Amino acid sequence: QMQLVESRGGLVQAGGSLRLSCAASGRTLSSHASGWFRQAPGKEREFVAAISWSGRGTDYADSVKGRFTISRDSAKNTVYLQMNSLKPEDTAVYYCAARGGVLLSRIYYAANDYAYWGQGTQVTVSS
């Protein structure tokens, strides 16, 4: 089993930046593909960003491309989501996720693809 714990989110003004971290325990993230999802009130959970098992592949939702960056620090067993140029529409609960048994370079986009989830952290962007 793997446990994932996200860092505290927060309140930030539009145009600001915030970095979320997701610390894993129980298993090593470097042997898993990871992703970030978010869910705004009244909306379905949506894909934000993902990184492949190898760590060499990343992809992003069109809405965050060029503003968000996903990365992984294997030594710290942690995945990060750097969020820049934040917009009010980025307001949501953010979740990190991971899955094992994967191909080295494959990116996973669907929530159903992931076996392990963090508890979620609130990010609020004020206008």
Image (cartoon, rainbow, N blue to C red):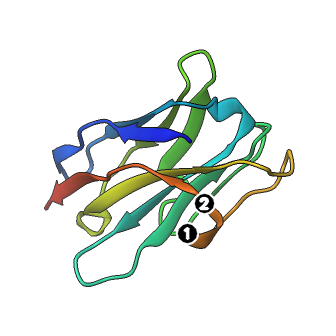
Left of 113 or right of it: where is 35?
A: left
Between 26 and 112, the one lying in front of the other is: 26
Please tell me whether residue 21 is drawn above or below residue 97 in the rendered image: above
- Residue position marked by numbered label 2 in the rendering: 114
Q: Quadrant of residue 91?
A: bottom left
Give percent across and percent down for residue 44. 39, 81
Q: Is residue 65 visible?
A: no
Left of 17 or right of it: where is 69?
A: right
- Residue position marked by numbered label 1 in the rendering: 111
- CB under 8 Å between discs 2 and 1: yes
Between 28 and 13, the one lying in front of the other is: 28
Task: Check disc 2 and report its element: helix, strand or loop.
Answer: loop
The quarter in which the N terminus is drawn is: top right
Please tell me whether residue 95 is drawn above or below residue 78 in the rendered image: below
Q: Quadrant of residue 126?
A: bottom left
Check disc 2 and give the amino acid type.
Tyr
Rendered image: mark on residue 125: none
Task: Check disc 1 and report its element: helix, strand or loop.
Answer: helix
- Residue at 65%, 66% in the rendered image: 113
- Residue at 80%, 51% in the rendered image: 102
Give percent across and percent down for residue 94. 35, 56
